[in-house]
Image (cartoon, rainbow, N blue to C red):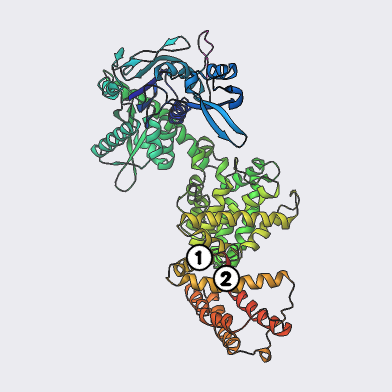
Amino acid sequence: MDTLLIEIGTEELPAGYIEPALQAFSALMTGQLTHARITHGAAIVYGTPRRLAVEIVDVAAAQTPLVTELTGPPRKIGFDDAGKPTMAAVKFAEKAGVSIDDLRIKETDKGSYLCADKIETIRPTREILSGILPDVIAAIPFPKSMKWGELNVTFARPVRWILALLGNDVIPFVYGDVQSGNQTCGHRFMHPGKIRINHPGEYIDALRRADVIADLDERRKHVAEEISRTAKALGGVILPDAELIDTVKNLIEFPVVSVGRFDDRFLEVPDEVLITAMREHQKYFAVVDDQRKLLPCFIVVNNTRARDMALVTTGHERVIRARLSDANFFFKGDTATPMEKWVEKLKKVLFQAQLGSVYDKCRRVQQLAEFIADTTVLDGDLKADVSRAARLCKADLVSQVVIEFPKLQGIMGRIYATLAGEPDAVATAIEEHYRPTYSGGPLPSSPTGATLAVADKIDSICGCFSIGLAPTGASDPYALRRQGIGILQIMNAYDFSFSLEALIDRSVAAFADVSTRPAEETAGAVYGFLKGRMAHILEEDGYSRDVIASVTDISIDHIPHVWKRVAALEKLKAETDFDLLAAAFKRVVNIIKKSDAEGADLSGVDESLFEHDSESGLFSAFKTVNDRVQHRLSEGRFEEALLDIASLKNPVDAFFDGVMVMTDHIGRRNNRLALLRKIAKMFERFADFSKIST
């Protein structure tokens, strides 16, 4: 067993290309080895802007033998009466590559046949890799590839060297005009020149000595530690930004940290604008004090240690001065324009070709937000705030700062609304109505923001469904799945227990003029979509699939109630005697489903038809429990309601033990079915117990 190492040396790759390419490179290599019947161990990837490398341990020196059983002519044709091989047997042995003595007789349903084991020629791994590696390199996918020189090969950037080792041996092949070998390159500036690698085990340490940290996790950790240490020396801290650290680590081979400063006058611009300008344009790290206020300095992670780092810092400061001057200009220009003027400009900003402008969307969202405010009984001031926030929520999309930095949408809306004297609730809601912006992200922190967020998201979902833009397995361009999850999480967090169906119906109605199908069909599709998202969330929360289905298949119309019913049922399911309880309830439900299918007339319960104490006992227990269950469900006391339902187990068991439901006496049979239907209807207020696995 040997270690395999393949490194592709290139001109500088874009940061976003590196990790996806490494994942594909690793998968291609292990896939090809497996296909070639070469056993191997785990794959490890290394990468920098100038190299993509895969190391695979425990690679076999040769293929695993492949034995194929070949069936030849029947025995009576292969051997004569004297038992000597005929020409048919000789030809079959030659075809199989074996001697006559290696032929075997195999008994089959059709009789006795000659057979032989053909062993494929075993090839050395090194020989096989020489043939497949050019194709592997060519198959690595990139967003964009290029050709260079007169060569008929492509790659993300020109390939300059290839290191290919299996143990101590070079794997010979050519890609483009580059011959593979046992040499790599160090840092372009700090350690130029070739480095000989005698064995894959030398690779990482040899590069480290040449000022290259090839291990991505090690390089990321180095960057994070260095910027944190530098910020602390400046009397501040780095704002958490894992995404920027990941980007920067793929822009460098060895991190060299430096510090720059900018004029205090720029601090008049909101911190969010300055931080975004530094981050988006220059990949600089902002430094804040212990109060999270921006300090007039920044940290740069350079890819080289220059002879005169002061000169490098001066260059960074000159660039950031220009960037911050632009940001200041945009911000000052925006503050001179009333937000109401921006609202009018939204009429010329397209939301979606069939769904109208962003202005149209804001009007729809405003109506939905006011409906939610009414149903959740917000007080007068909050309702006014919701309406005002809905009108202004997208206004900042036409501001100069947001046009330059789209990631600041909502954030700048809050800042501009505050500067314009809008109530805090309005300003906060403008920023928070986009939340959650990613899976697991924070929800709106205020009822106003929560109301606006739900209205905005349901409008997007219903609008897209109305014109046939529902998500598919391969496409969700409007992020409707994330928005659906956001709606459900917000409604649960804020105990928005109004009717989801009513909200959907109201939203769908706004698209009557453009909808490609009836409103009822669209509303049903949206409801089903959100039901699927609901099941997804609950499963991620750790609840059992059968419990989730038993509740969501009944209704998700009141979202907070769904969570509470599932939690209560999951808790009850953990009890030791739950299987017996569920079995009794399932029996009730299944009998009623069967009778409904047969069209039985179950108009009501007639106590005069009872002939057994178990019938009157069950009916009495039902009447007592039914009132309590209805009362507790109305108050949201779901766990207590479920315990009341569970108390019917013994009367139900006694009923089935005491009487035959499907008696030949039609009157008594229908009376018993009517009683069971009442009980089943009570069960259905909580869950479909027939779906519980026991």
Determine which residue is flagged by label 2.
Answer: 586
Q: Sequence order check: which comes first, mark 1 or mark 2?
A: 2
1 and 2 marks in contact (CB < 8 Å): yes
Q: Determine whether, in the image, residue 506 is placed left or right of residue 172.
A: right
Q: Is residue 250 magenta?
A: no
Q: Is residue 18 above or below residue 308?
A: below
Residue linked to disc 1? 694
* 150 drawn magenta: yes
How many numbered badges does the structure rendering display? 2
Secondary structure found at label 1 = loop
Badge 1 amino acid: Thr
Q: Specify start and end residues of the magenta stretch as a single range.
A: 145-152
| Residue 287 drawn at (x, y percent) | 32, 39
Q: Position of residue 247 (x, y in %)?
A: 40, 32
Tell me, for residue 397, which label it has, or none: none
The residue furthest top is: 150
In this picture, is 668 found above or below 174?
below
Quadrant in which residue 261 is drawn: top left
Q: Position of residue 556 (x, y in %)?
A: 58, 63
Residue 44 shows in the view: yes
User: Where on the picture, by quarter, is residue 497?
Assistant: bottom right
Compare residues 327 and 356 and report the one nearer the observer.
356
Q: Is residue 156 visible?
A: no
Q: Amino acid at mark 2?
A: Lys
Camera-side residue of 568 and 391 = 568
Badge 2 element: helix
Circle 2 residues within 10 Å: few <14, some 14–19, many ≥20? some
Residue furthest bottom as drawn: 608
